[in-house]
Image (cartoon, rainbow, N blue to C red):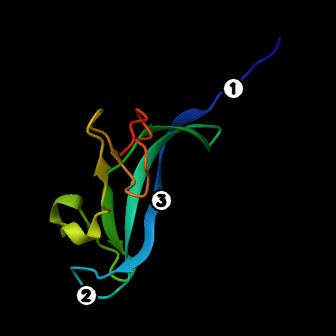
Amino acid sequence: MMFFFFIAGIQPKTITVDDTPRVCPICGTTNAYLKRTDHYLSIFFIPILRVKRGDPYLYCEYCKMPVEQEHMIDEFLPAYKICSRCGKRFNPSYNFCPFCGKRI
């Protein structure tokens, strides 16, 4: 008789969206970075599949305070192009929409 056990779950993973240091609106130092917390399906504690993409926020390494997106100044948010065909946002350096292929 064989027994198998299976460990799975959802775990958060914080990634740095942009490595450019920015000025923290709370403490004024240039130790703030644009980050995002995504949620991943993990099997045996190994992240396998992203199930939820988080919103970007500014996180200061000095004062350890996150600044939510609605309180951020527009200059902290990355600039995106919006496709006129499908309406999706994408990196402004692309010449084609990565979702529908339309030339921009």
- Say which quadrant the N terminus sits in: top right
Residue assigned mark 3: 15
Residue assigned mark 2: 28
Residue type at numbered disc 1: Phe
Q: Where is residue 58? Give x, y as percent.
A: 31, 68
The quarter of the displayed image where residue 102 is located: top left
User: Does label 1 or label 2 sit earlier along the sequence?
Assistant: 1
Alpha carbon separation for disc pair 2 and 3: 23 Å
Q: Secondary structure at mark 3?
A: strand
Residue type at numbered disc 3: Ile
Depth check, front residue: 96 or 90:
96
Q: Secondary structure at mark 1?
A: loop
Q: Residues within 10 Å of mark 1 (few under 14, many from 20)?
A: few
Residue lying furthest bottom in this view?
A: 29
Residue assigned mark 1: 5
Q: Secondary structure at mark 2?
A: loop
Q: Residues within 10 Å of mark 2 (few under 14, many from 20)?
A: few
Residue at the spot 39% in from the left edge and 57% down from the top edge: 36
